[in-house]
Image (spheres, rainbow, N blue to C red):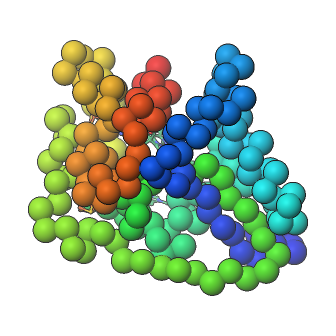
Amino acid sequence: MPDPYVSIALLSPDEPGFWNHVTAQPEFLDGGPDPLDRWSARVVQAVAQTLDAMALLPFGGPPYRPFVTWALRSGRAHGSPVSLLVHDRMGLMASWRGALALKHPLPATPAPAPCRSCATQPCRTACPVNALAEDHYDLDRCHGFLDTPEGRDCMDSGCSARRACPASRRYGRLVRESAHHMRHFHK
Ligand code: B12
Ligand code: SF4
Ligand code: SF4
């Protein structure tokens, strides 16, 4: 981290309510491309200015900022049985809209992975084509399935494996938001 910054605060959607808020913002109404990224850039930069911080954004690469590494270091996100990060509050719906590099230290607030108390681990069997494993994401298999009529459920409601996680379910992300992300992921 460049001097004089000493800590990083990661910023995620606060659910429920995020999608209704963000889709009423100018970036979603002007008909331009990538409204969510443009909204994130505007808002994270504005907050950074207020706090004398540096705005860091997860998109715009390659190269990309190492959000996965930062999320793991926060102690709130963890590796999961399906390779995606799992977060104590967001579950497998974990995502970050940006981060702030700060000039003062910030205490970490670690929380154990929800997997520890997840007896049935439904994420392991939820993908209809077994595209996800602990150390591997078979992208070709996933995209191939998303092109079939059976893949419509993932396209319209979000990745079945991410949705199956009990922590994801408690988070309250709207299906409409997941569908938006899936359209970008599988163009
Ligand atoms: C490129 C990218 C992808 C590519 C991956 C290509 C590839 N094979 O690398 C593709 C297009 C496949 C992808 C897909 C998705 N992605 Co993506 N992606 C990214 C992105 C933009 C860059 C990743 C990167 O290269 N970083 C640079 C490297 C150097 O830094 P790093 O990530 O910290 O690297 C370290 C880790 O990867 C770690 N590492 C290595 N191996 C492993 C293994 C495990 C198990 C773990 C935990 C860590 C780990 O070691 C690296 C070095 O330190 C990140 C955002 C970001 N800036 O990080 C999002 C990001 C990782 N993606 C994210 C999301 C949400 C998705 C989607 C779910 C999108 C969607 N549909 O909503 C999909 C998955 C599809 C699905 N089933 O739903 C989230 C995290 C989600 C999560 N819970 O893990 C991120 C953080 C974006 C965000 N804004 O929040 N993504
Ligand atoms: S379903 Fe259970 S094991 Fe899988 S990521 Fe969620 S909490 Fe962890
Ligand atoms: S989007 Fe559907 S096909 Fe792709 S990994 Fe998730 S559950 Fe499997």
- Residue 56 seen by the camera: yes
Relative to 96, does residue 180 appear above or below in the rendering?
above
* Closer-to-camera residue (145/118): 118
Can you see residue 136? no
Residue 37: quarter of image: top right
Left or right, 108 with respect to 27, comes to left
Quarter of the image with the N terminus is bottom right
Query: Which quadrant does ligand 2 occupy?
Result: bottom left
Residue placed most toward the observer, 1 or 17: 17
Residue 3, above or below 56:
below
Residue 102 figure quarter: bottom right
- List x then y, in percent, for residue 29: 67, 22
**Residue at position x 64%, y 26% in the image:** 28
At a point 66% along the width and 67% down the height, the residue shown is 9
- The x and y percentages for residue 176 are 41, 31
The residue lying at 68 percent from left, 43 percent from top is 40
**Residue located at (83% from left, 66% from top):** 51
Asked if 161 appears above or below 6 in the picture, the reply is above
Place of residue 5 in the rendered image (x, y in percent of width and height, measured from the top left): 81, 73
- Judged left or right of residue 128, residue 22 is right
